[in-house]
Image: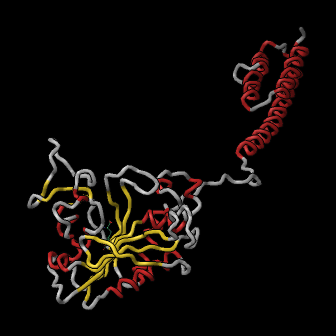
Amino acid sequence: MARADELEQVRSRALADIAAASNSEELDKVRVAVIGKSGALTKYLRSMGDVPKEERAQVGRAVNEARAAVEEALAARKQTIGEEELAAAIDAAAVDITLPGRAQQIGSRHLISRITDEISEVFLGLGYSVVEGPEVETDYYNFTALNAPADHPSRSLADTFYVVDRSGEKSAVRGESDVLLRTQTSGVQVHTMEDQELPIYIVAPGKVYRRDVADPSHLPQFHQIEGLAIDKGITFGDLKGTLEFFCKQVFGQDRKTRFRAHYFPFTEPSAEVDVSCGICHGEGCRFCKHTGWLEILGCGMVDPNVLEMSGIDPEVYSGFAFGVGVERVACLKYNVPDLRMLLEGDMRFLRQF
Ligand code: DAH
């Protein structure tokens, strides 16, 4: 084939390949194959020595022209491909700001924590402070110092979780007092009377444990808030006024309260407090077992024995105490029929509060 035809072929082939290259990698391959060290056109230039002298100038010009055309085509294609690739990269990384966002589910405080705070805040507002006591307690603080007789049924293995050692014997500390999971927050009264200066105005929220099987009205672990006020001249009237105020703050002004005489070892006299049923408002319905009333707390005037055991002179000081079940308050406030619903973690239920 004549040199000129061959050159023309290389040039048109190169231009076609350049036009067909669809990305910078392919284009670079074409560049190497045509004007690289051993590219088709380069070879041509190198073989100029074989060209007869008289044709050399002409052939040289043709080769240079072909090279210039190829280089120009390469540069133009490179620019186009560069723009296309940039546009594609921008497209791929683009965020469509018109799409709706993905909603994150926001958690909230559990109803039990909220009611605990709500009750504590009512008493904080009355000048009480919030204290805590141990959940692993001794028989002394949970029973003895609260005037519970040695044979009180709540001390029995059937009612209380005792901490046992490896042999299955009850564990004991200081003075052979058995170790147990507290069955009530009332032991915090004793710790506070031992540790704090008088007068005392405290509430003590916390977990308590009982050997009960969970059912609509019992849980083996639940929360109580203990209250204790000790000062000179405290009367049952102070107790009633305080707890009536508390009930109205938590349950609403329209709910009535009543005090029923009761017995607790650590208070004398003792009472239980009921609020009027939030469903039937006293008419009687299934929720209040047709009584119109719901029991919410135990209370009383601190027994002089209890004051004395903790080193307080009952001739000078008197006081009242109370214990509220937090789960119970939550259920009675929101008309929840089963305590276990608070613990099941069902978001459809919990989200309502
Ligand atoms: N500790 C009692 C209970 O768990 C509740 C209670 C009643 C606490 C009377 C008190 C009180 O402080 O005075 O059933």
Residue drawn at 58 percent across, 59 percent down: 351
Q: Is residue 203 visible?
A: no
- Quarter of the image for the C terminus: give it: bottom right
On screen, residue 250 above or below 208: below
- Residue 127 place in picture, x, y as percent: 37, 84
Image quadrant in which you'd find residue 136: bottom left
Q: Is residue 88 left or right of residue 240?
A: right
**243 relative position to 173: left or right:** right
Query: Along the line of sight, which residue is nearer the eye, 316 or 264?
Result: 264
Say whether residue 320 is visible: yes
Query: Residue 73: x percent and y percent?
Result: 84, 32
**x and y percent of residue 80 in the render?**
82, 38
Up-down: is 286 above or below 24? below
Picture quadrant where residue 194 is located: bottom left
User: Is 224 on the left-hand or right-hand side of 164?
Assistant: right
Q: Look at 18% across and 85% down and name the residue there.
A: 314
- At x 76%, y 40%, the residue is 88
Between 62 and 207, the one lying in front of the other is: 207
Residue farthest toward the left in the current orientation of the protein:
175
- Looking at the image, what colour scheme do you see? secondary structure
Q: Quadrant of the N terminus?
A: top right
**Image quadrant of residue 132?**
bottom left
Q: Nearer the viewer, residue 321 or 50?
A: 321
* Spot occupied by residue 64 in the image (x, y as percentages of width and height): 83, 27
Residue at x-position 71% and y-position 19% = 38
Quarter, ligand 1 = bottom left
